[in-house]
Amino acid sequence: MKKNIKLLFTMLALSSMIMMLAGCQKFLDRKPLTATLDDLNQGGLEGQIYGLYSNLRGSAGFTSIPWIAMHDFRSDDSEKGSDPSDGAEWVAPFDRYQYVKDLWASNTYWDDHYSLINLANTAIQTADSLKLTDAASQINIAEAKFFRAMSYFDLVRTFGDVPKIDFRIYNATQANIAKSPASAIYALIDADLTFAAANLPLVWGNQYPGRLTSGAAKTLHAKAQLFRGNWAQSLALSQQVIASGTYSLYSSYYGIFKDAGENSSESIFEIQAYVSPNGSIRNGCVYATTQGVRASTASGWNLGWGWNTPTDNLVAAYETGDVRKGSTILFSGQSDDPSTGGYGRVLPASTFDVPAGPLPRKYWNKKIYADPAYRTSTGLSDNPEWINKRVLRYADVMLMAAECMNELGSGATAIPLVNSVRSRAGLPAITFTDQAQLRAAVKQERRVEFGVEGERFFDLVRWNDAVTVLGPLGYTNKARFYPIPQPAIDKSGGKLVQNPEW
């Protein structure tokens, strides 16, 4: 939805420290400027929960290059991007799987995820200590547990066994504990998301656009079950989201990623961001900024940092006529194509073209391509930080359900779900032949539906396809897990040990 509500700021006092958190437009503009713990509902719990949303928006481990590197660079869909000399040290660890044990990207990813976990644990402990059992407090606890589960799902997929900290930390030494097996981490994820689904509302309406719902909890839980190959459990959760009637595919694919498509019928969860039309209020995130077209200011195409650029491999993956290709990829030297979300502008040529142009890459991520008019009015031509980060979409639920049906032997039942996604993409319907045929079709649909959205690498790993697909790029099976950051090991006093394969 178009962001046009005036933003207020919330000052939140946490029990162990004072934090000034800029409340993002959407629902974090509900408290007065002078609000403190004593003023907030549920004895300060609600204020801490609002802080979780704000922390998520501002954490590099969730919205900046560290997240993109872990989730996108490691796939065959995108690469580091930008100028070759810009961040050259990121190429080997992420594009070529030569992982580094002490690197800002992985260190930040680890730290920011545990920081959100710590804030969630503090909120949960606050509710417990105050014996808050009212409905509003249960919703707040559910939000905290969702964010804890989301953080752990990233960590367990990325690092494998990790420390399970499900308690409030009062001093740093309490966080120095050994790893728990992945099974224990998943058990916590399952419990947290089950609680969240049972206590979050189905919808918030216009009062709190962007706030967590039971559908978000069930969708994330379905993904966590799917990653483990728990087909029946993932299917049941996906079907509950579908049966709720709350969500639907957005009318146009490219429209999902435009300002008007934020918090749309297809949106299940987005990280909210806001910049006022004149740029005087800024409560955004740098997710889009990190990936905007990179060029000189004089060229008129200095739109961001230029990271996470699509590959030739992704470009070649689309079927003829698939509108998702032109909605996902901006091509240097070509029109931005208004029919798939462009604004009637022609990009300069790249250094790979003949004759060569100024852009350092052939392709760019179109899903974060910001409206030139809004760039001008805000004065943020190279920093479109008002764009929400899409995290969970209804199309994912549909394709997860289809995959589970097929793996459980009911592939023919899954065909309407797959064809709904294909129809929006402008592609003809497919028919069911056998399980292997539909399995390949679902893999294809997931790739092109979620291009450069951070799904591909983990899909390849869970399908056991990563060695085959990514092997030519340098991937080996041990690269399914990243080494635990060395600074975290050093701080643990010997309690935290490195992943065995690293």
Image (tube, rainbow, N blue to C red):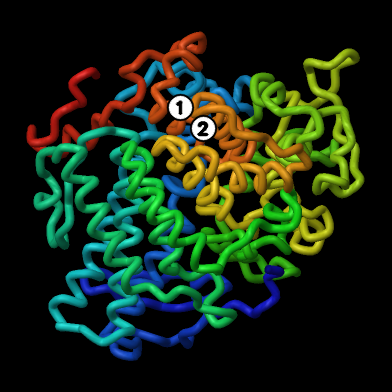
At 42% from the left and 35% from the top, the residue drawn is 407
Position above or below: 93 against 119: above
Considering the numbered disc 2 on the image, is that residue within a helix, a strand or a loop?
helix
| Residue 113, image x, y percentages | 33, 48
Are discs 2 and 1 less than 8 Å apart at CB?
yes
Furthest-bottom residue in this view: 39
Foreground residue among 249 and 1: 249
Distance from Cα at disc 2 to Cα at disc 1:
6 Å
Disc 1 target residue? 460
Furthest-top residue in this view: 472
At 22% from the left and 69% from the top, the residue drawn is 124
Disc 2 target residue? 456
| Residue 31, image x, y percentages | 46, 85
Q: Is residue 65 left or right of residue 4?
A: left
| Residue 240, image x, y percentages | 43, 61
Residue type at mark 2? Arg
